[in-house]
Amino acid sequence: MKMRRWSIEERSAGIFVLALLFCSLFCFALAMAIGKNEPEESAPEQVQDKNILPMQELPRVSPADAAYFLAATQDAGLAYQNRLTFFGESTTAHLKSRGVLPASQVLADESGTKRLSARLPFESVRDPESGKSTCFLEVIEKKKPAILVLSFGLNGLLNYAKDTGLFKQDYNTLLDSIQSASPDTKIILQTVYPVAKECDRFDDPTDTNRKIGMLNAALPEIASNYENVLCVDTASVLKDLDGSLDPAFDQGDGYHLTASAYKRILQYLRTHAWEEEL
Amino acid sequence: MKKALALLCLVAASLLVFAACKESYRNDLTPYELADHLETEGVGGLLRQMDDQVGFYGELQIDSPFALRLAEDGSNLDEFAVFSCENETQAKALAKRLNDYLKERYEKDRDWYLSYIPEELPKLQRAEVKTFGNYVAYAILSQNERNRAFDLLHQKLLQIKTA
């Protein structure tokens, strides 16, 4: 069978399509070549201070709870940090023993730990001025701290996870007593710190972190019942991608923290400062 | 036969004499004096006074004056308290509530104390409550100290009346 000869118009159209196809292929090949030869994106420039690691993206708080969390601010600096007084469990007492903060800013006793309970306000701490063992409430009444940063929840976690009402009740007891002793003190409730994937103290760290999440979810409600009480999500800067304690901050037992962890915590507190006039 | 009868009469008379004596406790001392007495005698080591701090007991309602002494620091659990009630019936009722409170406290705090002062936990586990007439006392102390504390209170408060 003899093929029909193309007309001039048909030949022109065919040439045009072929040219278009050729150009597309050429452009595609060019784009691929450029992509291969481009140098890889460089790592973010490291922050000059070797003790401060780059900040991770922070988790979002629900809109209802956001009102009770301190929002991000400019770094309020050492002047703000020096007005903070800390009281809490062993992970708070270590702010002093790790040499991160002076004894005058950390209320603790020889045991190096505390636990929320009805008795806590009456337990002893070392008076920062006299060095004597004194009732915690007496110290608060005398010192009248500008801002008191509290950290509780890991000690007693198993009981509190079974009954978060008990957690709220015990925290309320502490807050009531602090506000009676020093009504103008601003109180910040820190979220409970996470534990590492391998933790000496807890058989199932994943479940432990889930329980910690339950207590942290209760903090905004606790704060909502008081004037001068807000929350801060300090725990967020200690977490790995899966919500466990970042190994870089693990002192070795899965729940106590390194000095660099405390510096991150303080940085977070400075960058989520309570900005009202004190 | 006569000797046996005489011996029997003597025993009976002795029993009658003892029955006529009644052991009872004073009620004229304050709980603070009693606690001071224990401290003076060295019960419990270094202690802080938290007398009449009702908030310490949380939801346990305490209507009686009391002296509460705690270890000076958190590295040991030494603690005792003396309560003064209006009568023995109230004292016994308070003793029961304190007993329940101490058991609950042990259950709540057991794991925590195990994590940092396990050697102290038996003191709380074996905490004891006793009544001495109108007074109630509890002790979270070592066994020897606990027995000594209660003996001291018993001796201090004891009065023997004859009928």
Image (spheres, grey):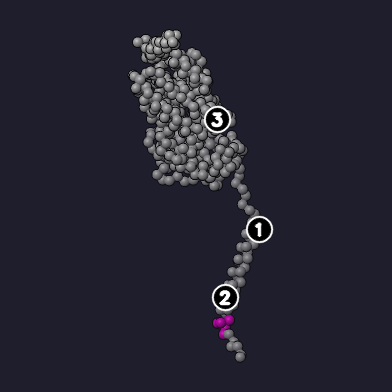
Residue beneath disc 2? A17
What residue is shown at x 61% (from left), y 63% (from top)? A31
Residue A182 rendering spot, x and y as whole percentages: 41, 26
What residue is shown at x 43% (from left), y 8% (from top)? B2
Which three-letter amino acid code belongs to the residue tagged 2?
A: Val
Residue stretch in magenta: A7-11
Q: Secondary structure at mark 2?
A: helix
Identify the mark at residue B118; answer none if there is no mark: 3
Q: Main secondary structure of the magenta part?
A: helix
Which three-letter amino acid code belongs to the residue tagged 1?
A: Asn
Among the 4 quarters of the image, the one containing residue A221: top left
Residue A99 rendering spot, x and y as whole percentages: 58, 29
Image quarter (top left, top right, bottom left or bottom right) of the C terminus of chain A: top left
Q: CA distance from mark 2 to mark 1?
A: 31 Å
Chain letter for mark 1: A
Q: Secondary structure at mark 3?
A: helix
Say few, some or many: other residues with alpha carbon within 10 Å of mark 3 (under 14 / 14 to 19 / 20 or more): few
